[in-house]
Amino acid sequence: MLIASLAIVAGLALLIWSADWFVDGAAALARHFGLPALLIGMVIVGFGTSAPEMVVSAIASIEGNPGIALGNAYGSNIANIALILGLTALVSPIAVHSSVLRRELPVLAAVTGLAAWQAWDGRITRLDAAGLLLVFGALMAWSIREGLQRKTDDFGSEMERELQIRPLPPRRAALRLLVGLAVLIVSSRALVWGAVEVARGFGISDLVIGLTIVAVGTSLPELASSLAAARRNEHDIALGNVIGSNLFNTLAVVGIAGAIHPVAAAPEVFSRDILAMSVLTVSLFVMGYGFWSPRRINRWEGSLLLVAYVAYNIWLLQGAFAG
């Protein structure tokens, strides 16, 4: 149990470090090849910050741990909205300026509905996974088209400033990309092994471990980047990190895991976890569009998101130990 716990701690630490290197290297290389800042922010940074969830869920699926694969994806989505945006809004209320983000909010709501529909029968089949990956490919094509065509946007302007803060020469960027990817894979393997062993030791399901420890750990890159963006008043980056990550998690992470091996979804995945994810997504949609207030997630709403996250985890752990 001690070795497994150390594997989780070391795996999470290396996962965060490697994800940061991977994102920095990929973004710098993309900038070197002349890609627009908006495209880098929407696609490359979004892909990079979701790389931990992708690798962890892929390894979990390969090794026959579907609970960790699904729990990591859906738990990360819940943590992204309730924990990360809640904390970020407390640091600085999040104004929703970008037209790109406002268009992505209803897309996220629709994708969440698709996830609920697929989990209804208790199984993510390879056909379901193919559908998720097809939708993901279509969204990536749309994002690339938007990034290449749009010249001015709040999100793109903020990403341009970010890229200028941390410039890297091409060789160093390539080195960071490769080292980050290699350590990402190794640390993900250690994290999955440790999580499975701890779950067995405490007699709880790997789904609960995936929804809690693994999900929060793989969401730490988004937390760090969102808090840093909020302190610099780069609100569209903070919100874009969460929306992009949730789209990647729901489509690509679950899609890759299901394509590797069909994933069984326990009844509570639909009745508890997807329900919580859906309610939070709708609340984000309402707050982001500002139907009765300015387009802003204020501190009061951030506090409500944090309360919701604590309540969800109490619900989760009560069910785990009751069973």
Image (tube, grey):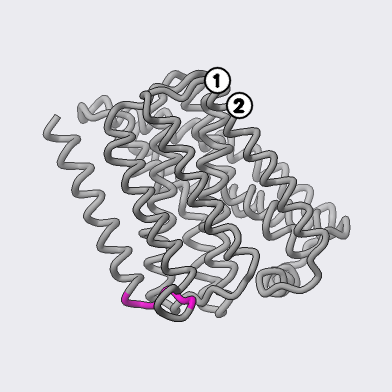
Q: Is residue 232 above or below residue 36?
A: below
Q: Position of residue 315 (x, y in %)?
A: 19, 46
Confirm or deny contact between disc 2 and disc 1 (CB under 8 A). Answer: yes
Mark 2 is surrounded, within 10 Å at the Cα level, by few (under 14), some (14 to 19) or many (20 or more) other residues, namely some
Q: CA distance from mark 2 to mark 1?
A: 6 Å
Residue at (44, 49) in percent of width and height: 77
**Residue 236 position by quadrant:** bottom right
The amino acid type of the residue labelled 1 equals Arg
The amino acid type of the residue labelled 2 equals Ala
Q: Position of residue 37 (x, y in %)?
A: 76, 65
Q: Secondary structure at mark 1?
A: helix
Q: Secondary structure at mark 2?
A: helix
Can see residue 169? no
Q: Position of residue 101 (x, y in %)?
A: 59, 64
Residue at (38, 36) in percent of width and height: 71
Say if the magenta span includes residue 297.
yes
Which residue appears farthest toward the left when viewing the image?
322
Q: Which mark is residue 166?
A: none
Q: Which stretch is magenta?
A: 295-300
Q: Is residue 228 above or below residue 30?
A: below
Q: Is residue 232 left or right of residue 210?
A: right
Q: Is residue 30 left or right of residue 127?
A: right
Tell me the residue that label 2 is attached to: 130
Q: Position of residue 47 (x, y in %)?
A: 64, 48
Q: Which mark is residue 126?
A: 1
Can see residue 42? yes
Residue at (63, 38) in percent of width and height: 135
